[in-house]
Amino acid sequence: MQAVVQPPYDIIILGASGFTGKYVVREALKFLNYPGSPLKSLALAGRDPSKLTRTLQWAAHPSPPPPIPILTADTTNPTSLHRLCSQTNLILNCVGPFRLFGDPVVAACTRSGCDYLDICGEPEFIERMEAKYHEQAVETGSLVISACGFDSVPAEMGLMFNSRQWLAPAVPNKVEAYLSLESDKRLVGNLGTYESAVLGVANVQKLLELRRSRPKRARPVIPGPPPPKGSVIENQKKIGLWAVKLPSADSIVVRRTLSILTENPHGLPGIIESPEQIEKREVFWSTVKPVHFGVKLGSKSLLGIFRFIMVGMFIGLFSGTAFGRWLLLKFPSVFSLGWFKKKGPSEEEVKSASFKMWFVGHGFSDNSLLSRGNLKPDMEIITRVMGPEIGYLTTPIILVQCALIILSQRQNLPKGGVFPPGIVFGPTDLQQRLQENGISFDVVSKSVLPT
């Protein structure tokens, strides 16, 4: 019997010299050849070897850079991407915007059977990759998971954490997530996030066309009536925030996970699971209840909310034409009112920033109340996820921990397919790993609502 030849690198980071990529390298180096870590070999890949060399020096500072191979690859060159896939078990893709540069990388991975993670928060790309490559990924054993950064793991894991606090006979009906971005200094966002938002709004029609062309997914059965729409601007007094609806990938990714869970109530089976692992997975998913879910962006002041709305209006008004998109992308600082700038935030601005994501769940203290005609929720559970700056610190932490789980627990995960992160990583130890690396989960309150 011929021995299986392992590729030389456990992980290749593609786009390692980009804004976020260099922070992913820095995070990965913490676990390279660390005792107990499955990460024994690592390579960096991109178009410019000299930039990658400087990235490695920056990421390793103040230590000398370790002898990590620098590989040349370009998303416009399929041959270079296939060469990468033959050299590793797992590619971490940091090359965005993904709707422009991501497809060839997913294509190469699914063709070769290489696993793939990215930090994409672009709904159209995420859904298009599933439509285009899921069947091939299942056949070749390529596990493809987008949104393995701040988009959308805190939303997925945070919702599951809230859902699991509803102990029988209590059941949740809806959970609203409220995102609050905080800083001792000026908040400066990730330019890639801004570019993705501009292109996402510009191509919303393509997303709708894609959805119309695809078969309808299973809808989870949620106890109680659909919640009312609510006002455009909300004052959520219990958490001290004004809030407005955030059109992000989070709610879309969460709904995909809940839909897959409806079709697979015990979750997705792994390649070779032990009986104990099967029981652990099934017990975990039995505690996760489907809910109506939405995300809102919060601010401690009403003025902050109007600022959010203004930026949203600029993107909505200008992204519909080529000239408008050129203006938005040429002058990000102007149209984002200073939140995004071309050179990105300084190290001090990154270190001073943090996030809080509150999950406010409403439901019923006893499921039998519904059969008696009591349709107004009488119970509230508030939970919270907190962590460091979202784009350059939290995102690399999440991506690297997801990668380490794939390296160490691959037999417990699905053989292949294109999936959201929640349905794959939910029953693993991802939450515990995030808590050990600076991202906390806690229960804020459980209370009775006035009826």
Image: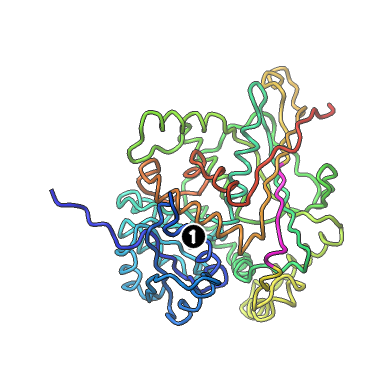
Which residue is label 1 attached to? 118
Colour setup of the view? rainbow
Which quadrant of the structure image shows residue 331? Answer: bottom right
Seen at 50% across and 52% down, the residue is 401
Magenta segment main secondary structure = strand
Which quadrant of the structure image shows residue 76? Answer: bottom left
Type of the residue with mark 1: Asp
Q: Is residue 166 above or below residue 45?
A: above
Which quadrant of the structure image shows residue 297? Answer: bottom right
Q: Is residue 304 above or below residue 441?
A: below
* Mark 1 residue crowding within 10 angstroms, few (<14) / some (14–19) / many (20+): many
The answer to which of 77 and 25 lies nearer the viewer is 25
Q: Is residue 60 above or below residue 159?
A: below
Q: Position of residue 173 (x, y in %)?
A: 68, 33
- Asked if residue 30 lies left or right of residue 368, the reply is left
- Asked if residue 265 lies left or right of residue 4, the reply is right
Seen at 30% across and 52% down, the residue is 140
Q: Position of residue 3 (x, y in %)?
A: 18, 52
Seen at 68% across and 50% down, the residue is 386
Q: Secondary structure at mark 1?
A: strand
The answer to which of 342 and 369 lies nearer the viewer is 342
- Asked if residue 81 lies left or right of residue 183, the reply is left
Residue segment shown in magenta: 350-359
Q: Position of residue 9 (x, y in %)?
A: 34, 62
